[in-house]
Image (spheres, rainbow, N blue to C red):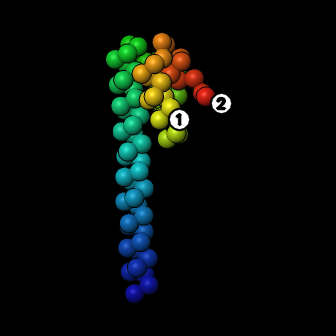
Amino acid sequence: EGRKEGRQEGRQEGRHEGRKEGRQEGRKSLLRKQLQLRFGSLSRTAKQRISEASASELDKMAERVLTATSLDEVLAPQS
């Protein structure tokens, strides 16, 4: 009984983590598309910055896409 519950909890946790990672990747993909449409091709450095960004950093970048005048302005770390 205990093992069965443990496996079930593990599967649920795995699904939750998978969905969370999927949403994060979706946000990164959308941000890359928005930046490409606004500023043209993205450099390897820009792609890496997006890839390594946390969820809160991605949110801030997504907001700056609307007002920034350059790619560097969108990707700059905020203090």
The residue tagged 1 is: 57
Q: Which mark is residue 19?
A: none
Q: Secondary structure at mark 1?
A: helix
Gap between marks 1 and 2, in whole Å? 11 Å
Q: Amino acid at mark 1?
A: Glu
In the picture, the quarter occupied by the C terminus is top right
x 52%, y 39%: residue:
56
The residue tagged 2 is: 79
x 43%, y 22%: residue:
65
Q: Is residue 66 positioned above or below 21 on the image?
A: above
Q: How many marks?
A: 2
Residue 44 in percent (x, y) is at 48, 21
Mark 1 in CB contact with mark 2 (< 8 angstroms): no
x 61%, y 28%: residue:
78
x 41%, y 34%: residue:
28
Residue 39 in percent (x, y) is at 41, 13
